[in-house]
Image (spheres, rainbow, N blue to C red):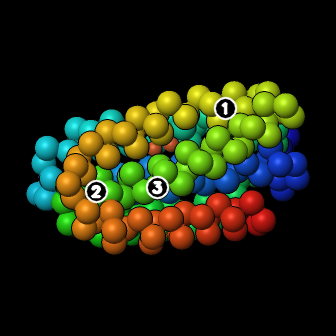
């Protein structure tokens, strides 16, 4: 028997597929950063591995929810992986502050979207809301622990905040419409 997957139709289905693609991007950011972090930020390797494991479990939560609903993954899934890996490798080369500034910037945008998604989903799709709320605590922790690495460091946030905000917003905007 072949399972036929359909394109996302409802808001909840779009959110699930965009978040699934976004988590793939997050996994790849950390994978890219880990490539050089052993040399440029050895003290962060453990934390990056831990964060990457969280992102893999988040991706699994959304993958399972899409599969249960018979919805195919986002067309931006592979793009998110490539973009995330590229961002990760470049920032990983520059070490601790660049790595932490990337996570803080990504999570700031992501957390704002997750809260907005939850407001709609809590009334319309409790199962999708549950999937989203399962990841919020981890994302907040990634944000807060990364921010703690950046005390007094203003250079990397000033450079990366706008770049990351525009690219993350674009990916979400595009994913919701694909
Ligand atoms: Fe995540
Ligand atoms: Fe995260």
Which numbered mark, 1 or 3, is in the foreground of this view?
3
Q: Which residue is mark 3?
A: 106
- Work out how far the residue at label 2 is from the one at label 3, CA to CA, in angstroms: 11 Å
Pick the quarter of the image with the C terminus: bottom right
Determine the residue positioned at 46% across, 37% down: 140
Q: Earlier in the sequence, mark 2 or mark 1?
A: 2
Q: Identify which residue is drawn at 33% across, 63% down.
A: 157
Q: Residue at x 34, y 72 (%)?
A: 159
Marks 2 and 1: which is nearer the front? 2
Quadrant assignment for ligand 2? top left
The quarter of the displayed image where residue 124 is located: top right
Q: Would residue 28 be found to the left or right of residue 119 on screen?
A: left
Q: Earlier in the sequence, mark 2 or mark 3?
A: 2
Label 1, on which residue? 131
Between 92 and 77, the one lying in front of the other is 92
What's the CA distance linking mark 2 and mark 1? Answer: 27 Å
């Amino acid at each position: 028997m072949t399972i036929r997957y359909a394109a996302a139709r409802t808001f909840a289905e779009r959110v699930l597929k965009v978040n699934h693609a976004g988590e793939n991007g997050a996994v790849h950011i950390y994978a890219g950063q880990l490539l050089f972090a052993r040399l440029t930020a050895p003290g962060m390797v453990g934390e990056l591995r831990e964060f990457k494991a969280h992102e893999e479990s988040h991706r699994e939560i959304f993958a399972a929810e899409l599969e249960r609903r018979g919805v195919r993954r986002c067309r931006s899934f592979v793009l998110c992986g490539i973009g995330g890996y590229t961002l990760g490798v470049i920032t990983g080369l520059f070490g601790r502050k660049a790595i932490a500034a990337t996570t803080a910037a990504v999570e700031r945008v992501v957390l704002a979207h997750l809260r907005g998604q939850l407001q709609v989903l809590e009334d319309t799709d409790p199962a999708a809301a549950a999937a989203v709320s399962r990841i919020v605590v981890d994302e907040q922790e990634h944000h807060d622990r990364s921010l703690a690495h950046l005390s007094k460091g203003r250079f990397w946030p000033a450079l990366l905040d706008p770049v990351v905000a525009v690219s993350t917003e674009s990916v979400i905007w595009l994913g919701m419409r694909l």
